[in-house]
Amino acid sequence: MFTINPRALLRASRELIRHGLDVDDRLQVPLPDTGRSGCATQEGLERVLAETTAVADDLRHLGDALDGFVTTSPGVDGGVRGALDRLLPGATP
Amino acid sequence: MSLSTSFEGDPESCWRTAERLAGLARALEDARGFVAAQATSSPDDFDGWSADAFRLSAGRLHGQTQRCETACHELAVALTAFGTSLDTVRLALRRTRELARQHLVVEGEEILRPGPYADDGQRRTYELVEQTLDQARRFEHQAHRDWQAALAEHAGTAAVPAAELPGSAVPTEPTEPAGSAGPVRPHVPAADAPVRPPVPPAGPVFPAGPAVDVPVGAPVGAAGAAGAAAAGVLTRQPRPPHDLDLALDLALEAPGEDDWAPATPTPHALPVPVPWEVPDGPR
């Protein structure tokens, strides 16, 4: 058995998706002209932005997974194996 | 032999990028706060295996978000400081070029060494220009080192050895404090070279001041300070070394060639005697 508050979880899923989209919107960072440090600057910013892009994707995926779980949970019993798999760390949507 | 006043980089683009990084860090901070709340949410709303899995995922995501937030924030701070340093160097080079143009021969960005028949004022001007350029290049070199160190620490780029850093040809021996009688001349080739007499400082003394608050993602000018005050984001920035003070003073005291300013003599302009009687011999 499990306890679920669909309204609270749906609100949480929307917030997760919103935060993911908000981070995604701010990922357009121009490359500065740092003169002789240009190569290191490009490499460093690309690394940070790539990791941040992954975070934004994970935020949206977790929100989608939570939304899917809340949507499917009324029709199943306490196992909810499919939705549980989606919520596990490292799961892909 | 000539002195180069060429400059690489764009401080404004550094400030723009730093501002975007600071905005990204704020978005990540908001997300991190929400994810942290979800990782420790009450079991009254969500309980069971799925709830545990969700909290585990939220906790993992919290750590990732925090790392990215820290990296973006620290890089924004470092890039703002780097842009400010580049701007200082650019201004110092511009002012030095302007000073040299009044007394020496300047071809493009190159300041030519005065010839054998130059007067004492021109030689002293050249020495002053040489010292100022040396300090500006040292400060530029240190700014690149600091920025690349920040990249290595927060973005995981390879740490560049000191020998490969830009401007590493500049000697690294410590310079004397500002205002001292004998400035270090790092380009003297040999120990038996003739020692030049100390050149008195042409401008005021620049004592080291306290640390300053610099807004993230904004220049330190008046407009930048106003924008940063509106943003409400301040960060503590270390006080730059004393060699910046000379460059800063040279940059800020005299009006630049591109700035509007009344036609007043610069405080660094040395008196150049005008010979009314041309001596005999070739000139």
Image (cartoon, coloured by chain):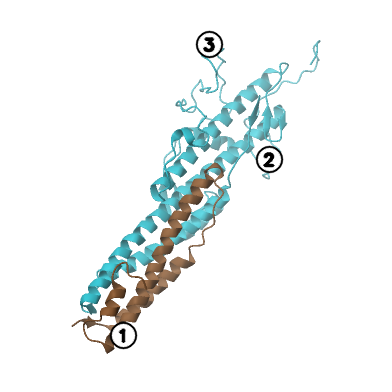
Chain colours: A brown, B cyan
Q: Are marks 2 and 3 on the same chain?
A: yes
Amino acid carrying mark 2 in the image:
Glu
Q: Quadrant of residue A56?
A: bottom left
Q: Tell me which chain the residue with mark 2 is part of.
A: B
- Name the one closer to the observer, B199 or B24: B24
Amino acid carrying mark 1 in the image:
Thr
Q: Are marks 2 and 1 on the same chain?
A: no
Q: Tell me which chain the residue with mark 3 is part of.
A: B
Q: CA distance from mark 2 to mark 3?
A: 40 Å
Amino acid carrying mark 3 in the image:
Asp
* Residue farthest along the bottom direction in this orientation: A75
| Number of numbered discs overlaid on the protein picture | 3
- Name the one closer to the observer, B95 or B34: B34
- Name the one closer to the observer, A55 or B194: A55
In the rendered image, residue B95, in percent from the top left (x then y), is placed at: 63, 36
Q: Are marks 3 and 1 on the same chain?
A: no
Q: CA distance from mark 3 to mark 1?
A: 87 Å
Does residue B247 appear anywhere in the picture?
yes
Question: Where residue B192 is drawn, which disc sits there?
Answer: 3
The answer to whether B15 appears left or right of A18 in the picture is right
Q: Which residue is mark 1?
A: A72
Q: Residue at x 36, y 74 (%)?
A: A63
Q: Which residue is mark 2?
A: B257
Q: Tell me which chain the residue with mark 1 is part of.
A: A
Q: Quadrant of residue A74?
A: bottom left
**Residue density around tag 2, few if under 14, some if 14–19, many if 20 or more, within 10 Å:** few
Q: Secondary structure at mark 1?
A: helix
In the rendered image, residue B251, in percent from the top left (x then y), is placed at: 59, 38
